[in-house]
Image (tube, helix red, strand yellow):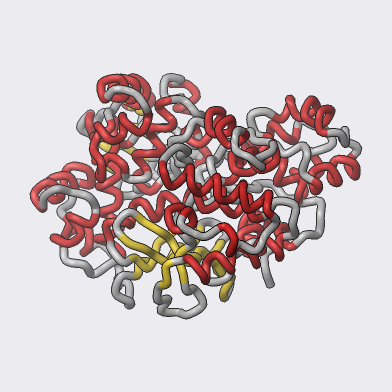
Amino acid sequence: MHLDRERCARAVRSKDARFDGWFFTAVLTTRIYCRPSCPAVPPKAENMTFLPSAAACQQAGFRACKRCRPDTSPGSPEWNLRADLVARAMRLIADGVVDREGVTGLATRLGYSSRQVERQLLAELGAGPLALARAQRAQTARLLVETTSLPMAEIAFAAGFSSIRAFNETVREVFALSPSELRARVPGNRAASTPGTLALRLPFRAPLNPDNLFGHLAATAVPGVEEWRDGAYRRTLRLPYGHGIVALTPHPDHIACRLTLGDPRDLTVAISRCRRMLDLDADPVAVDERLRADPLLAPLVDRAPGRRVPRTVDEAEFAVRAVLGQQVSTAAARTHAARLVVAHGKPLDDPEGGLTHLFPSSEALAAVDPETLAMPRTRRTTLTTLVRQLADGALHLGVESDWAEARARLLALPGFGPWTADVVAMRALGDPDAFLPTDLGIRRAARELGLPATPAALTARAESWRPWRAYAVQYLWATDDHPINFLPV
């Protein structure tokens, strides 16, 4: 979009927050870059240039606006819509892979050479993987500086910098302030009162309907791993350097996020996974416009716009839970999962009580005696085959997964039919066009609305909903009075 100067200039003049994260406005006279919705008086058109990423702005010598804070923009929805090399690379960079494994590790995960990954990112985003990761480190550093009382040296390494000098130089270059000056600008004392706990806001593009999003997560919550408490969804997190606990509370203009981390180096990854779980980088206006074009879907969209797809923080965990949920009720699936958690999950301490375990890893489940699993033999075979392949690396499910390839690999497993493969694609892998024409709730909704009721005919009708069929699923599910569609009281 940043190449369409006229469209970008219109968005800046109208201060349209929908385009925050799609592109950045770099002002040639002040050498400052802003989000499109910056409240400052828009500069003259000839003094603006438009760049596709914060990293590109920083590489070009622009510093972040202190007023609109472009580093806190929602992420571009493109990276969740596309499944090409650039999109998969961006999802991995957001998950902290470059900081942990370097550019070589990033390229290995993608199956391309480092040079090819660098060339593709430079062509589309104006910055390579190192610059993109550096911009992300700067944002993490700012969060830690402003929301904690950690010493600056600890913040530097927690944010992923290799040295305190690199931390100081980057913060000065990006924000035109030293780390100490950044902290001094924070009014009052916002530092977390509990050691290891951070409170922050997760932005999103409006509208956002929290009912099905949090309702689904709460209704399917596995005891010990997840819970709904005091208006917040809480769950445990398995992270690269340790574990964490997150509490997420919906508000009209943001999601309040309270993170308790065993290691602060996990902050960037934890935020990225929470944003992904809540689908916060979606463009609901674009989604709803496409679905509203169908006269039978339009009333559902108009009644409650902005539905998101509830996703996951752990793709392998969700695949296991999808198998446990085959042909059983939501309550039964929770019961099966809770038994696995108690027997094989890693215990942890929750300062607030209620959460007791991490969900069992694939390695732990692969070591389980199949005869101890209280489920039908065919489903037991499906589960044990899945966890063995996940544990030995024959099957990998992650943010970088190619959706079509992953779906084909899942369908090759015993007991995996289209419903299970597509629900994993939709909620674990993030495919926005995954569709569930055989789902009982979808077929019931189709009959009530006058849509074709058979899977083949419904799939043909849903062609006009592409590439947002996963969102159409949320609107169709919402016609039922199932608990997944309502915020818990």
Horizontal and vertical percent position of residue 217: 61, 59
Horizontal and vertical percent position of residue 13: 47, 33
Q: Is residue 473 left or right of residue 82?
A: right
- Residue found at x 44% / y 30%: 87
- In the rendered view, would you say 439 is above or below 47? below
Q: Of 149 and 37, which appears nearest the observer?
A: 149
- Residue found at x 31% / y 42%: 97
Query: Can the viewer see residue 55 in this picture?
Result: yes
Horizontal and vertical percent position of residue 116: 30, 20
Q: Is residue 83 left or right of residue 286?
A: left
- In the rendered view, would you say 359 is above or below 69? below
Q: Is residue 304 left or right of residue 334?
A: right
Horizontal and vertical percent position of residue 26: 31, 32
Point out the residue furthest to the left here.
165
Q: Of 89 and 489, which appears nearest the observer?
A: 89
Q: In which quarter of the image is residue 181?
A: bottom left
Q: Of 184 and 166, which appears nearest the observer?
A: 166
- Residue found at x 73% / y 63%: 483
